[in-house]
Image: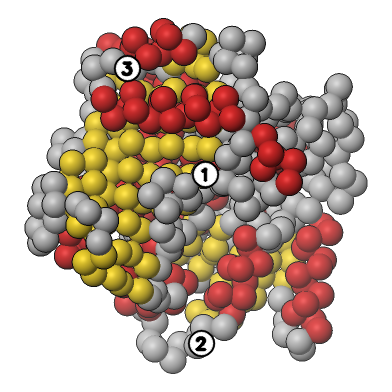
Amino acid sequence: MAHPDPTRRTFLQASGGAFFSMAAMGFAVPTQRLAFGKDDEIRVAVAGIRSRGVAHIEGLRKLPNVRVVALCDVDSGFLGREVAKFEKRGEKVDGYRDFRELIKREDLHVVSLATPNHWHALQTVWACKAGLDVYVEKPVCHSLGEGLRMVAAARDYKRIVQVGTQSRSSYAIRDAITWLHEGHLGEIKLARGFCYKPRKSIGKVSGPQEIPRNVDYDLWTGPAPMRALERKQLHYDWHWDSTTGNGDLGNQGVHQVDICRWALQEPGLPTEILSVGGRLGYDDDGNTPNTQIIWSQFASAAMLFEVRGLPRDIKAQKEDWGGGMDRYQGVKVGVVIDCEKGSLRIPDYSSAEALDLDGKSVKKWNGAKNHFANFITAVRSGNPADLNAEIVEGHLSAAPCHLANLSHQLGRTASAAQITAALGANPAMSEAFQRMTAHLLANDVDLEATPLTLGRALLAGNTTLSQAMEADPSTKPWLFRDGRGEFRFPS
């Protein structure tokens, strides 16, 4: 395949291997951040505009004294489509293919990132170094070490970096969690997160696929290993390829992981992670689990997370895949915090309900504010404390997802009996596993023919976790993610 300029080779040659050299990239290191008054115009660029990026464009351009001045996408079709929308409204916007060219603009203040997961860290670090504030979609990064680098860049360059975990801007959820912390339901026993979201097969191809002519695949791949496209659809289905995405645990599930960690008031990483799951019910080109249970032990309490991409049974697969998903206590994609005097249910991004031990409603909350508006408020003040979802919170909420997927990748296939025996000392995981196997049976999944994976238990501070980190170099904070080194962080 011919690579358009700039090529991956020129990426490396640009600065003799020192790809993060500011001089080589044509930037001056910012000495201080700009101050904005309430009436000053903030000029924004949006990168990654296929679908979620459109929400970024509309969410930002509708805010007072905010102007979207540039768009960036490696797909010229999407880029042309969105530029045309601006032109139709009589608005001026510039289009860019290469993010590095975009952030050289001297009139830019903010970048908003809705690019694939494997690009989040590098673009955030580049933008911070260029003196720009950043809104970055969840999960903040593709691996644990990348998140550390993003936090460091925000601190080193004194930038405002907001994460797209918009539940943090829900005053209903905030007030409900504050009420929980006041002790009205007693001690928290277990935080439960759920991602019961329909995910059909992405299909299976027999060999490399042709890259769409309007896509710069070299730039699309970026810091990921350069490989042939071996799935039907380039866009979106990268979520189910572990070299670019993090499965539904890191896609949808990170929102609910974030709420669980918020409720637990946990300021750090879990001390223990264990995954049980697999990609079951179909044979396709995805390699991330569509069915998974994860145990994350924190200092205060544990989090039990469940992922289900298949509907409730084989009949629902044939008749109503999207509407036929399972629920746990009425929740499909949400959170249930089990406490000694009842539970707190958070079924979406903007509501919550407390129930007593008999299931009777005790108190309800509803409402949310604009997450983009919160970001712009912090950009104007220059104070990261004004953010509802500052980068360190996003990093800490993505971390259990990355560690759980690492547990899965380092695991081994096992029979249901073997997994049951392994989980015997953990009644909550055992009960969740029984429900999961019943769910799979209802979907005609033969666990002897397609067994589950019992992940490796990762324990903080012991050799098992150290070995896991060595097995996945992307978790090392000093290395990005490519054997040839084009996108390494400086050591």
Estimate the x, y position of residue 144 in percent, counting from the top left.
40, 34
Q: Earlier in the sequence, mark 3 or mark 2?
A: 2
Label 3, residues with CA under 10 Å away: few <14, some 14-19, many ≥20: some
Give the mark count: 3
Q: Which of pointers 1 and 3 lies earlier in the amino acid sequence?
A: 1
Q: CA distance from mark 3 to mark 2?
A: 55 Å
Kindly identify the residue that appears in the image at 43 percent across and 61 percent down: 348
What is the quadrant of residue 468 in the picture? top left
Q: Secondary structure at mark 1?
A: loop
Residue at mark 3: 423
Is residue 411 depicted above or below 107 in this figure?
above
Q: Amino acid at mark 1?
A: Asp
Q: Secondary structure at mark 3?
A: loop
In the figure, 77 relative to 461: above or below?
A: below
Residue bearing the label numbered 1: 326
Residue placed under numbered mark 2 in the picture = 65
Counting other residues with Cα less than 10 Å from the Cα at mark 1, is it few (<14), some (14-19), or many (20 or more)? many
Kind of residue indicated by mark 2? Asn
Q: Is residue 198 above or below residue 159?
A: above
Q: Quadrant of the N terminus?
A: top right
Regarding mark 2 in the picture, which secondary structure is present there?
Answer: loop
Mark 2, residues whose alpha carbon is within 10 Å: few (<14), some, or many (≥20)?
A: some
Query: What is the quadrant of the C terminus in the image?
Result: top left
Q: CA distance from mark 2 to mark 1?
A: 44 Å
**Which of disc 1 and disc 2 is earlier in sequence?**
2
- In the image: residue 332, left or right of residue 37: right
User: Residue 11's x, y, as percent?
Assistant: 66, 38
Q: Which of these two is toward me, 131 or 400?
A: 400
Between marks 3 and 2 in the image, the one whose residue lies nearer the viewer: 3
Q: Position of residue 471 (x, y in %)?
A: 45, 15
Q: Foreground residue, 453 or 469?
A: 453
Question: Given contact means CB atoms under 8 Å apart, are the residues at marks 1 and 3 in contact?
Answer: no
